[in-house]
Image (cartoon, rainbow, N blue to C red):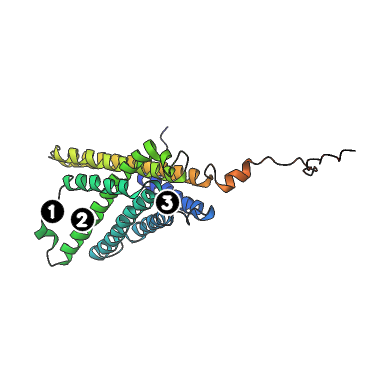
Amino acid sequence: MHLNFGFSAVQVLWTLTFAAVLVLLVALLGRDRARRFPIFTTSMALMALRMVASRLLYGKMAPIVSSEIFLVLAVVAGIASLLVVVEMARRAFPSGSRMALLAVGGVVLAWWGPWPSAKTLFAGSTLGVLRLAQLIAQKAEMLAALLVIQLGILVVLFGRRFNAGWRSHVQQIVIGLSTAAMAQLGVRAIWQVIALHTTIQSRADYARVMGLQEKFFNADSVVFLAALVWWIVCLWIDEPGSKASAAEQLPAAADGEAPQAEPLPSDAK
């Protein structure tokens, strides 16, 4: 028996992801986590805005105008991703470790191409500006992914020695970010290998490659959805040792019984 729900996998994943982002924002604001992680909260709000814009505006505006809007949002999102890494690194490790992370990430980013020519990027035209904005968005996103993977490894290994111990919100956020980043870079690397070694000779070959690409991207979306659920659960629960957590662990007095003071010793006669 074949069940036809009328929705594609992309539509289902988009709906679930958008709902999870909204629930995460409720958890961040309702549990007062936004005050501690303002940039992370802003990045999640920006993600919700991009998802809504892509659904409402795609295919309903002139291609150049829609490209300008989406690329501006992509550049802002890439910068926000880098600032999220900075926010988490500042709460987890001293400044020396953060500079080492940036150096390693910059080397890997420079090696991981392709890089277009300067003549193409800085051409005095609207298309050249759009290409430059696309490059900035892509490289900022990739650099943020590389940095957060390194940060995740360091937090898991050495977080207890600093400010990101086990079950702390910093560690839980970084674990989710690094897991999503590893899936994203893994899918990108696999797809680059497939694109380089695939020869399309017919329409059937093209359809097969595009179907394979959709499956890879859907797998990446599933990993990110799992990270969103992880953040919702972890950020809703108080950290061990926090004031709220300590208050919950205090033994409650028996119903109807007031706590009794220790009797004073009587005077010797």
Residue 122 in view, yes or no: yes
How many numbered marks does the figure carry? 3
- Point out residue 37 in the picture as x, y percentages from the top left corner: 44, 54
> Three-letter amino acid code at disc 3?
Phe
Which kind of residue does numbered mark 1 sit on?
A: Pro
Q: Marks 2 and 3, how far apart in space?
A: 26 Å
Q: Residues within 10 Å of mark 1 (few under 14, many from 20)?
A: few
Q: Are marks 1 and 2 in contact (CB under 8 Å)?
A: yes
Horizontal and vertical percent position of residue 256: 80, 43
Residue with the mark numbered 3: 18
Q: Find disc 2 in the rendering and name its residue.
A: 135
Q: Is residue 214 left or right of residue 47?
A: left
**Identity of the residue furthest to the right in this view:** 269
Q: Residue at x 28, y 51 (%)?
A: 141
Residue 5, visible in the rendered structure = no
- 150 relative position to 120: left or right: right
Q: Earlier in the sequence, mark 1 or mark 2?
A: 1
Above or below: residue 223 compared with residue 85: above
Type of amino acid at the residue the image marks with label 2:
Leu
The answer to whether residue 12 is left or right of residue 30 is left
SS label for mark 2: helix
Q: Which residue is mark 1?
A: 116
Position in image of residue 102 (x %, y %) = 26, 48
Q: Residue at x 49, y 43 (%)?
A: 234
Instruction: Tell me which numbered mark, 1 or 3, is placed earlier along the sequence.
Output: 3
Q: Quadrant of the N terminus?
A: top left
